[in-house]
Amino acid sequence: MQAVPTVDFAPAIELLAVASLSAAGVLAVWWWRQRRAGHGDRRIALAALAAFLTADLIVFGAFTRLTDSGLGCPDWPGCYGAASPWGASAHIDAAERAQPAGPVTVTKAWIEMIHRYLAMTVGALILALTVVLARARTSVGPASAFAWAALAWVLVQGLFGKYTVTLKLYPAVVTAHLLGGMVLLGLLMAQLEALRQAPRLAAARGAAWVLALVAAQIALGGWVSSNYAVLACRGFPLCNGEWWPPADYAVGFTLLRQLGRAGSEGYVSFEALVAIQIVHRLFAAVVVVAVLALAWRLWRDRGEVARRAAAMLVGLLMLQLLSGLSNVLLDWPMLAALLHTTGAACFVALLVVLVMRARPQRAAATAVIEGALRRHHA
């Protein structure tokens, strides 16, 4: 396969143009649908759109990883120095002829580049939302701070995407890229809730601790996926026919190593992959208890909003358990794997909403004044 520089900024201008056109189209649809709405409702709709597309981006990132398309274009930010696989067709054909089952094919190249196009479109929308909030004539409270944080973080996420390619799917970077996407989604959901200024939900106290546990479990799940350890344990609840099979936790959780490698000691052993899978399973039990405890507290509140949130938590928990078991028992089917990532993103979004609603309300006088200002300028 012909060597190619891992970082080539030559197509950057063309990629920015593609992202700008894509974002302009999305913004045009948003503006048309919200043309009769007030300024406040428009901002909420734009924030919701950015959060929705970010969740889509997370799931499509999982699809990119599951189809082994992460190196479909082995350079960054373009594809063999071109802005699309069309411009790189000669290089892709040569690579595919050299390694028909290798990491570079026409299909994988398109999957990888579509992921990059979507990521750049999300970045452009976040920039547009930040500008809209910065120019708001009424106070938008902490929403503006969340907007600036999201804008800064999307740049960090871009670096994770770059190093995912240039470091050849380094497991720690791939896992960090997944977590970074979840952080971005959380920031956008927090911004959306700040704009909505929904009433406080006292029964949601403790949601921040559950969110922290879910984040840790997502990190463990990312580590399972990036090390291809999903099928290291066959069967459930037993692992390869044993309650406590041989496992190498030291190598399994060595973060600074290449994919499949164990430093100077050669390749990662099967026992190391078993260790990764076992820890993910055990910590899942902790998360289940925490989520059920929060759901029970919300259900006891008896309010409609609280009970709806409790039902959603239990529903998402069931989705995660069933999709996780399907990955193991049905040999990692694509649908189950994507549902597992989707459920994780939904968990983050819902828990961030609950964290925001569990915060103490602002002084009543301040709320009344800002409400009057919003109605005046809407």
Image (spheres, rainbow, N blue to C red):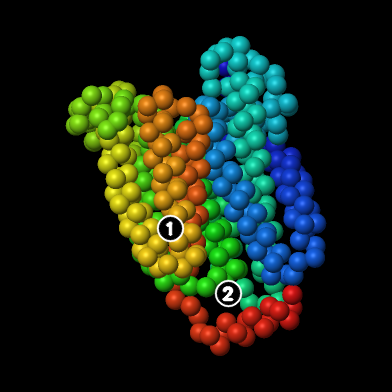
x 65%, y 22%: residue: 106
Task: Name the spot of residue 346 as percent of width and height, x first.
Answer: 50, 49
The residue that label 1 is drawn on is 310
The residue that label 2 is drawn on is 141
Q: What secondary structure is marked by label 2?
A: loop
Q: Quadrant of residue 192?
A: bottom right
Is 56 drawn above or below residue 124 in the view shown? above
Q: Which mark is residue 112?
A: none
State which tag comes first along the sequence, 2 or 1.
2
**Label 1 crowding class (10 Å Cα cut-off): few <14, some 14-19, many 20+?**
many
Let me know if residue 15 appears in the view. yes
x 42%, y 67%: residue: 302
Is 6 drawn above or below residue 186 in the view shown? above
Q: Is residue 141 left or right of residue 136?
A: left
x 61%, y 37%: residue: 115
Identified by mark 2, the residue type is Gly
| Figure disc tally | 2
Dividing the image into 4 quarters, which one contains the N terminus?
A: top right
Between 318 and 17, the one lying in front of the other is 318
Label 1 near label 2: C-beta < 8 Å? no
